Image (cartoon, grey):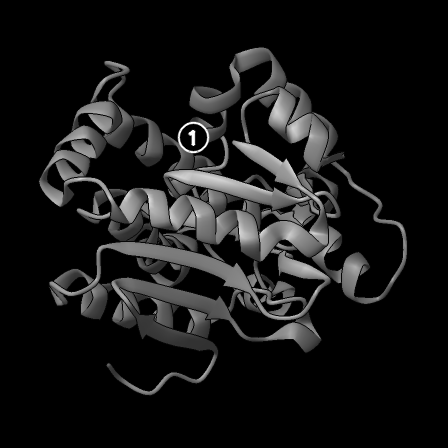
Amino acid sequence: MGSYKTILVEKKNGVAKITLNRPEKLNSINKDVIQDLSLALEDIRKDENVRVVVITGAGDRAFSAGADISMLKEIKTPVEARELTWSAVEKVLKAIENLEKPVVAAVNGLALGGGCELTMACDIVIASDKARFGQPEINLGVLPGWGGMSRLAMIVGFHKAKELVFTGDMISAEEAEKIGLVNKVVPAEKLNEAVDELVNKLLSKSPIALKLAKEAINRGPGIDVEAALARDRELFALSVSSEDAKEGLSAFLEKRKPVFKGK
């Protein structure tokens, strides 16, 4: 197990717990977080002693508020969007989806943008009643770029996905549970207890059976996921390099209302 800049990794009794550790930035995701997650997941994949993985956020305000806006603002062209951002993030999310072990998201606060997309790649999502979910990228003039359109539609259905992406609205943990984005909502003070209960239940099952069940269910919908994610990638690249995106991101950082011109 290596040393990481932006995450904490604890292995104990067959469980690997990954904590996004940038609470002062609402655990937003930058290049260092992406690299650390990639390295940690590869280490966990190889560790036969790890049977269940838990991902959570440090502090009590956020699981992850999404991509670090300063990172997105550096992107100037569709090529940069694809190569510098998407490829690395896609590797992390696929590593979670393809990991031959159950991955549980313990959502302790805000799960917005890339943070919400991270939960979608996990197998089971347990949320605090203080958690909030959403894909607010549209408010910045960009699209969800980390699978938040295709995965979201597969999880909650096309109409609800369009509503969430088109409006950029946040929803409560209870609403997220109602539409299938979350498996279970518990009082904030009971989150760790609920996650531990689930983890212990998973540890009691056959690792081989869990591995095969995960593979079968992931392949079950009959949707060409690779093609859908590739389409998301292209649309994100086009949106984030647009003039509207530059305006939206600048307005966010300058704390003003954006003026979009459709360019």
The residue drawn where x is 29% and y is 54% is 52
Q: Amino acid at mark 1?
A: Arg
Q: Image height check: is 119 above or below 164?
A: below
Q: Quadrant of the N terminus?
A: bottom left
Residue at (21, 44) in percent of width and height: 98
The quadrant where residue 80 appears? bottom left
**Quadrant hosting residue 68:** bottom right
> Residue 27 at what x, y percent from top left?
60, 67
Above or below, 83 relative to 100: below
Where residue 154 appears, x then y in whole percent? 42, 21
Picture coordinates of residue 14, whole percent (x, y): 25, 63
Q: Nearer the viewer, residue 44 or 111?
A: 44
Position of residue 161 relative to residue 137, above or below, is: above
Q: Is residue 60 left or right of residue 145?
A: right
* Residue 49 falls left or right of residue 111: left
Q: Is residue 241 visible?
A: no
Query: Which of the two residues, 36 or 197, is positioned nearer the viewer here?
Result: 197
Q: Tag 1's secondary structure?
A: helix
Residue 176 horizontal/vertical position (percent) = 64, 30
Quadrant placement of the C terminus: top right
Residue nearer the viewer, 123 or 140: 123
What residue would you read off at disc 1? 151
239 with respect to 226 (left or right): right
Does residue 88 appear left or right of residue 47 in this picture? right
Q: How busy is the neighbourhood of tag 1: few (under 14 within 10 Å), some, or many (20 plus)?
A: some
